[in-house]
Image: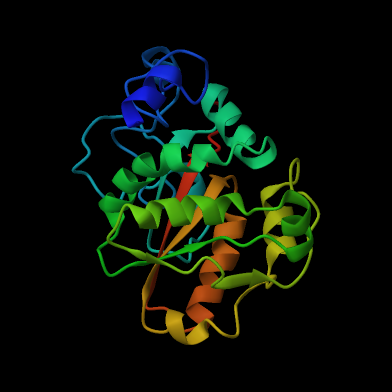
């Protein structure tokens, strides 16, 4: 039966109609046009850095040398441009929820660089009104598919947004941090589960890092032992 289904509905690239060998994958052309972050990167946010000595850990990008990051390490899978931007927007606003499953192995490889098996995966939350309008939290989908690959556990509702904030596109870094200060907290029924744990925060895009910072502070306020962050895509200057 499975062979018949594959014959009638052969696997297709998640970004175009070309055939692929596996479901939920990119074709060769789309893979080549997707800006993956490989090689040397900022140890705090995952921004690609010049050079190829990946053993040289602890290097920071210009932003992370200026802005204090409350988390200990961070990574990103893609540079937020071109096909990566299209992929993120398709997931976030185009109801292409299957894309979360497609990118989970990419997230897993990056997570392996900074996390151990005892890490707890937590998504950055949406405010309930935005969640009601969108019907899903893309960060939660990413976190849950990542957890399915093992061996880390996931609590999709560990954090909540207590205040609705306006969209932050076009805002300065300082405006973003000010708007998000104190708006994320641990869910009252999940605080005990965060206490003493190593946390991996997941979100679709990192721009200034303000959202990750607010979520990190919420985790520490609940007693987390350590927090690391992972974004599907990183906004990079002049990228």
Number of numbered discs overlaid on the protein picture: 0
> Is residue 4 or residue 36 the one in the foreground?
4
Q: Is residue 185 above or below residue 230?
A: below
Position of 78 relative to 14 (above/below): below
Q: What residue lies at 52% left-to-right and 22% top-to-bottom? A: 15
Residue 77 visible at all: no
| Residue ID at (56%, 66%) | 215
Give the residue drawn at x 52%, y 39%. 98
Residue found at the far front of this picture? 1
Image side of residue 68 versus residue 37, left or right: right
Could you say which is closer to the camera, residue 71 or residue 77? 77
Residue 144 drawn at (x, y percent): 46, 56
- Quadrant of res 238: top right
Rendering colour mode:
rainbow
Q: Please identify the residue farthest to the left as the structure is shown.
A: 55
Q: Is residue 129 left or right of residue 174?
A: right
Residue 114 locus on image (x, y percent) = 29, 56
- Tell me if 24 is positioned left or right of 233 in this view: left
User: Image quadrant of residue 38?
Assistant: top left
Vertical side of 96 occupied by 143: above or below: below
Residue found at x 43% / y 51%: 145
Residue 160 seen: yes
Query: Percent position (x, y) of residue 26?
Result: 41, 23
As drawn, 4 above or below 54 = above
Q: Which image quadrant for residue 109?
A: top left
Q: Quadrant of the N terminus?
A: top left
Residue 227 picture location, percent across and down = 41, 67
């Amino acid at each position: 039966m499975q062979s018949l289904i594959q014959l009638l509905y052969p696997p297709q690239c998640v970004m175009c109609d070309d055939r692929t060998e596996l479901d939920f994958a990119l074709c060769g052309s789309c893979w080549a046009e997707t800006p993956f972050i490989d090689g040397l990167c900022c140890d705090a946010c995952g921004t690609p850095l010049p050079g190829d000595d990946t053993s040289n850990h602890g290097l920071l990008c210009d932003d992370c040398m200026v802005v204090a990051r409350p988390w200990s390490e961070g990574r990103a899978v893609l540079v937020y441009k071109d096909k990566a931007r299209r992929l993120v927007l398709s997931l976030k606003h185009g109801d292409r929820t299957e894309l979360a499953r497609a990118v989970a192995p990419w997230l897993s490889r990056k997570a392996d660089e900074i996390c151990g098996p005892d890490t707890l995966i937590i998504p950055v939350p949406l405010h309930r009104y935005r969640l009601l309008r969108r019907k899903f939290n893309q960060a939660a989908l990413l976190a849950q598919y990542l957890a399915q690959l093992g061996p880390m556990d996931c609590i999709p509702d560990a954090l909540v947004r207590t205040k609705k904030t306006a969209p932050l596109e076009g805002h300065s870094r300082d405006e973003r941090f000010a708007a998000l200060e104190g708006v994320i907290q641990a869910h009252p029924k999940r605080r005990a589960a965060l206490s003493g744990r190593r946390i991996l925060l997941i979100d679709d895009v990192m721009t200034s890092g303000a959202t990750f910072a607010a979520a990190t502070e919420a985790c520490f306020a609940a007693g987390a032992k350590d927090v690391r962050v992972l974004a599907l895509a990183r906004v990079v200057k002049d990228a």
